[in-house]
Amino acid sequence: MKALQRRVIRGGFEALYFSGAHHLMRPLVGGLGAILTIHHVRPPRAGRFQPNRLLELRPRFLRRVVRWLRRSHVDIVSIDEMYRRMREQDVRKRFVVFTIDDGYRDTLEWAYPILKKHDVPFTLYVPTSFPDGLGELWWLALEAVVARSKRIVLLVDGKERAFDCAKVADKHHVFEQLYGWLRSFKTEEKLREVVRDLAGRYQVDVAAFCRELCMSWDELATLAADPLVTIGAHTVNHVMLGKVPEKTARAEMEMSRTVIESALGKRPEHLSYPVGDRASAGPREFRIAAELGFKTAVTTRPGVIFPEHRHHMMALPRISLNGEHQQLRYVRVLLSGAATAMWNGFRRVDAA
Ligand SMILES: [Zn+2]
């Protein structure tokens, strides 16, 4: 299923690119610019079972994207500069904003040297439990459980179910099923409970991923000291805010800002909703973010930025650089706005 989905997506991109349609469409659907989303930047790892690979870019690909943008007629700007341009309706030149989510150590090791060399400002959204060493990177724990097991037994909706996953193809299938099932839970609590239970039963140390992969506060301080870097909030526990009570959602956003301010000395003015899809961030979260006084808040709803987003700064779309599609031509199509315009049915703003 996923393979087919990938082929369809790729086919669509190729059609838009090679027909030149993206080029023709850009004046209509390209908007003012775009905000790019990155998670990991690091050399590829060995192994055929890496279901989270879509969150991972090769350093060489990031370098190509940056060099291409530097040659193009766009400004690479900080999120504050984007905010200023939108408020003042300064639309002389198209812009691109780089954002990196989660604060993985590979940001410091791989992404930062590339961005620094090309003088690229970027925003890093940090869930504060990660540098505290307490984050639960449950999607990686799930990957590890499936990777290490030949057979997984667990309770699904009160019934015991077994999943065979000895072969790589089965592993992909089982991961997708379990991932989809976890994401469909109405509450974040239930998701965490199931993953903790699974990890416990299959000897996976959930906390180890955080210690191994995430930057410490000292490492974050190194980045925060660079004027190129803006540190943004990304909640405390990286929860899907739409799946927790309002009081918790507000506390997650507010507390993360306070913790970052006390650790790094600067109060974050920008927010990224964890996971950031419709189930994680909707009108309630947009309202809370506005009430808390954030200047901007980004989702993962796909899209480019239009002048109308000036009135929806708490519901900004982004364009994800996907590890499954590391080709410059996909980035061209995405930044033209053509692919996301079709995805969004040519609706410019989606803040509902
Ligand atoms: Zn995140």
Image (spheres, grey):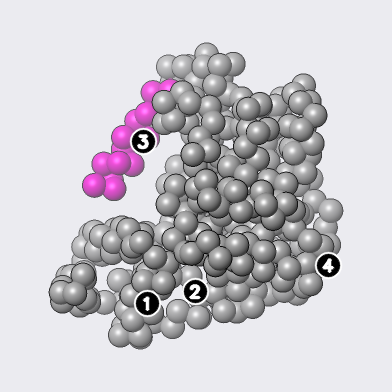
The CA span between labels 4 and 2 is 25 Å
Residue at image mark 4: 265
Q: Quadrant of residue 345?
A: top left
**Observer-nearest of 93 and 166:** 93
Q: Residue at x 45, y 79 (%)?
A: 206
Of the image marks 4 and 3, the number of the one nearer the N terminus: 3
Residues at discs 4 and 3 in contact (Cβ within 8 Å): no
Q: Amino acid at mark 2?
A: Glu
Q: Which residues are magenta?
A: 1-17
Q: Which mark is residue 193?
A: 1
Vertical side of 154 occupied by 38: above or below: above
Q: Which mark is residue 9?
A: 3
Residues at discs 2 and 3 in contact (Cβ within 8 Å): no
How many numbered marks does the figure carry? 4
Residues at discs 2 and 1 in contact (Cβ within 8 Å): no
Ligand 1 neighbours mark 3 (CB distance < 8 Å): no
The CA span between labels 2 and 1 is 11 Å
**Observer-nearest of 175 and 110:** 175
Of the image marks 3 and 1, the number of the one nearer the N terminus: 3
Vertical side of 192 occupied by 41: above or below: above
Q: Residue at x 29, y 48 (%)?
A: 2
Rate crowding at label 3 as few (under 14), some (14 to 19) or many (20 or more) other CA atoms within 10 Å: some
Q: Nearer the viewer, mark 2 or mark 3?
A: 2
Q: Which mark is residue 136?
A: 2
Q: Helix, strand or loop at disc 2?
A: loop
Q: Is 93 displayed left or right of 240 in the figure?
A: right
Q: Helix, strand or loop at disc 3?
A: helix
Q: Position of residue 190 (x, y in %)?
A: 36, 71
